Amino acid sequence: MKKNWNYEAKVAEIETIISRIEAGELQLEEVFEQFGAAVKSLRECESFLQQRQQQVDLMIETLQDSEQ
């Protein structure tokens, strides 16, 4: 992920795309392009959350080890 990548900004971007699709603001070709962009962003968000979950799990494990 890029250094200036922002989870909240990506979620807002996805929400905007979904709103525009639901409102019928886009031509059919644009719907497919925007849907593809939303799927890509969702995958990036999922990857980001998985990485953060691994970090949290590691921190918890480290804390538990230090308590023993």
Image (cartoon, helix red, strand yellow):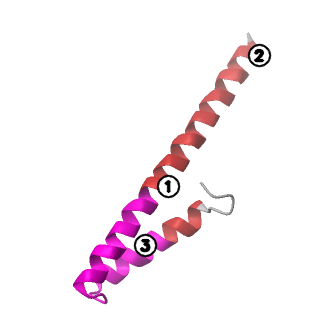
| Mark sitting on residue 45 | 1
Q: Position of residue 54 (x, y in %)?
A: 58, 34
Q: Which residue is mark 2?
A: 66
- For the residue marked with disc 3, what is the amino acid? Glu
Tell me the CA gap for discs 2 and 3: 42 Å
Look at the picture and state if 45 lies above or below 37. Answer: above
Q: Position of residue 24 (x, y in %)?
A: 26, 87
Look at the picture and state if 56 lies above or below 20. Answer: above
Q: Judge the density around disc 1: few (<14), some (14-19), many (≥20) Cα neighbours within 10 Å.
A: some
Question: Disc 3 or disc 1, which is closer to the eye?
Answer: 1
- For the residue marked with disc 2, what is the amino acid? Ser
* First to last magenta residue range: 13-42
| Quadrant into which the C terminus falls | top right
Q: Which residue is mark 3?
A: 15
Q: Secondary structure at mark 2?
A: helix
Displayed quadrant of residue 18: bottom left
